[in-house]
Image (cartoon, rainbow, N blue to C red):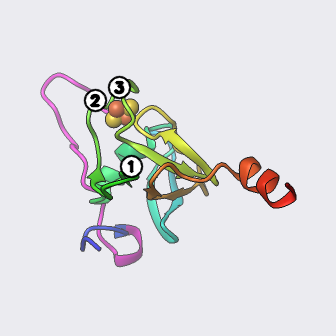
């Protein structure tokens, strides 16, 4: 795993642009959430993938057949490159989904499992 993942746990700060000549950055409350079981930090309300990027995470999922890594592509919610499993729900577009404290974000492998579908298969 990338050395930058989990700066909160290792005492390193987030990799963010702090100053800009035109833009003023305003963040929500600093919160903790989980990425593949590790507790890391981000700002509430920012896109999940932005928080992951600030923590050095660049791979969000791997493709179903070839297992190729995928990260940002459009970053505006128009593709499927940033699909991840969020709080047990697969195929969440993390570039447009706001971060909340305590979220459990996981790398998605393949198409992901829909919990209700798994439950139905067990009973059929
Ligand atoms: S990167 Fe395209 S939908 Fe998120």
For ligand 1, give the image quadrant.
top left
Residue 76's label in the rendered image is: 3
* Of the image marks 1 and 3, the number of the one nearer the N terminus: 1
Mark 3 residue's CB less than 8 Å from ligand 1: yes
Residue 95's label in the rendered image is: none
Left or right of 117, for residue 21: left
Q: Please provide percent x and percent y for residue 26.
A: 38, 33
- Residue at x 31%, y 31% (from the top left corner): 75
CA–CA distance between discs 2 and 3?
Answer: 5 Å
- Residue at x 24%, y 74% (from the top left corner): 3
- Residue at x 31%, y 58% (from the top left corner): 57
Q: Which residue is mark 1?
A: 51
CA–CA distance between discs 1 and 3?
Answer: 15 Å
From this viewpoint, is residue 20 visible?
A: yes
Q: Secondary structure at mark 3?
A: loop
In the image, which residues are magenta? 8-26
Tell whether label 2 touches label 1 (CB within 8 Å).
no
Left or right of 36, for residue 24: left
């Amino acid at each position: 795993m990338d050395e930058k993942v989990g700066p909160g746990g290792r005492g390193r700060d987030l990799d963010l642009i702090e100053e800009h000549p035109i833009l003023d950055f305003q963040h929500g409350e600093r919160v903790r959430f989980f990425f593949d079981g590790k507790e890391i930090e981000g700002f509430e309300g920012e896109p999940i993938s932005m928080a992951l990027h600030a923590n050095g995470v660049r791979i969000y999922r791997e493709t179903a057949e070839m297992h190729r890594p995928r990260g940002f592509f459009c970053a505006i919610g128009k593709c499927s490159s940033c699909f991840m499993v969020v709080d047990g729900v697969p195929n969440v577009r993390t570039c447009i989904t706001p971060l909340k404290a305590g979220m459990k974000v996981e790398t998605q492998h393949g198409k992901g499992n829909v919990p209700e579908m798994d439950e139905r298969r067990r009973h059929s």
